[in-house]
Amino acid sequence: MKHLILILSLSLSAYIYAQEPVDSLTIDTLTADSLTVDSLATDTLTADSLEMFNAFAPADTLFCQTPAPLPELPDSVYKQRLQELPFVIEMPYNQVVRSFILRYTRRNPKQLAALQRKAEYYFPLFEDILCRYDIPYELCYLPVIESALNPMAHSHMGAAGLWQFMPSTGRLYGLEINSLIDERMDPIRSTEAACRFLKNLYSLFGDWNLAIAAYNCGPGNVNKAIHRSGGKRDFWSIYPFLPRETRGYLPIYIAAAYSMNYADMHGICPAAIEMTEATDTIRSSARQHLLQISTVLDIPIEELRRLNPQYARDIVPGGKDYSICLPADRVTDYIDLQDSILHYRAAELVHNRRAEIDLMQKTGLNGGYSVNGVTYYKIKNGDTLGAIAKKFHVSVKQLRAWNNLKNDNIRAGKTLKIGR
């Protein structure tokens, strides 16, 4: 799977690189280059377009009552805090992990604050599904580095959604992707698909760090790295043999987990981002437009789009059950007013596609033709309105009325309608 980590070389050591000013941060982005297991602290670190935190508007976190700036922390503090996290997945510490922690906590605190606020909405959803699939809760930090918790995120390679599925992988795991719906951007459906994918990767490798690496670069590349390492099955042992972008993937993941859990200890408070937090879903097999729901229930269309990003053209396709996410206090209104919703501007918004079109057919020896039950005649040189009326057994007055003619003048090449 191709995810959002690309490469831009910077000739700085891992530690110094983390201290330099950066305009924005993302994982289309952060990755370690030319790093070996024995020289993590000194080799070259690389990154690309640093877009992850560009997904959010700047957030004011000045209401946090903490010293600014906070003093530099020793490595022992980061190491201890990582070990204290109640996680199943191993969270080791090294200077590459440190460099990415500093990017989150010192270079982009406002964006981290925005991530925290979005996590308040998405993490409970992730937790329920991760629990159902019996896989570690801490995998909820993957969408943090994949999409910055933006369900509408798209990569230049074609990946989309919170979990950044490519279309082929999404379809393989049961996601519907077509012109009207892209379930890669459905928070629930995409999370279910990601859980199935991650569970399969863990079954293949028996190690969550390797499963996470395979989520980024594919199981084939991880298997090659295992083979080239002499059969070792540990991320840090096969590290030099992994694709360059994947070497930075696990360190960034560990840094994201640390930063999201200890942001408050770095003086970062959740940003005030407007987002409906109490939501519920209802299933419907009726074809409908989000504007119908928006108008009848008086819910802003932008809010409906944010809650239902999978509907690419605002249309719920119908024909089978599809989920519609609504503010929790409006679900019963939807049930009570469903008929009104489905009938509101239905001809314009929903039933505006012709189900059948008749082919043109000749109507006999008179030279006319019919389309969808209406007869037409193309005027030829020498034709008169009276002769055409006689040919079709109608009156001149009728022909003039049907074609909005003010007089009997007609011109060759034009088409007359015969009848209403």
Image (spheres, rainbow, N blue to C red):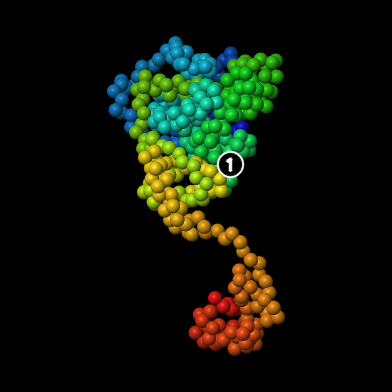
Tell me the residue at 42%/21% (across/down): 261
Where's residue 309, x and y in %?
A: 48, 42
The residue type indicated by label 1 comes to Glu
Name the image quarter holding the N terminus: top right
Tell me the residue at 52%/46% (across/down): 285
Tell me the residue at 49%/42% (across/down): 283
Where's residue 87, x and y in %?
A: 49, 17
Q: In the drawing, does residue 346 fall left or right of residue 209?
A: left
Task: Inspect this view and state whether residue 163 appears.
Answer: no
Q: Is residue 158 above or below residue 194?
A: below
Residue furthest front as drawn: 336
Q: What kind of element bears circle 1?
A: loop
Occupied quadrant, residue 399: bottom right
Where's residue 299, x and y in %?
A: 38, 46
Q: How many marks?
A: 1
**Crowding at label 1, few (<14), some or many (≥20) Cα neighbours within 10 Å?**
some
Q: Name the residue nearer the viewer: 220 or 200.
A: 200
Occupied quadrant, residue 278: top left
According to the image, label 1 marks what residue? 176
Name the image quarter holding the C terminus: bottom right
Tell me the residue at 51%/24% (across/down): 131
Q: Is residue 106 above or below residue 147?
A: above
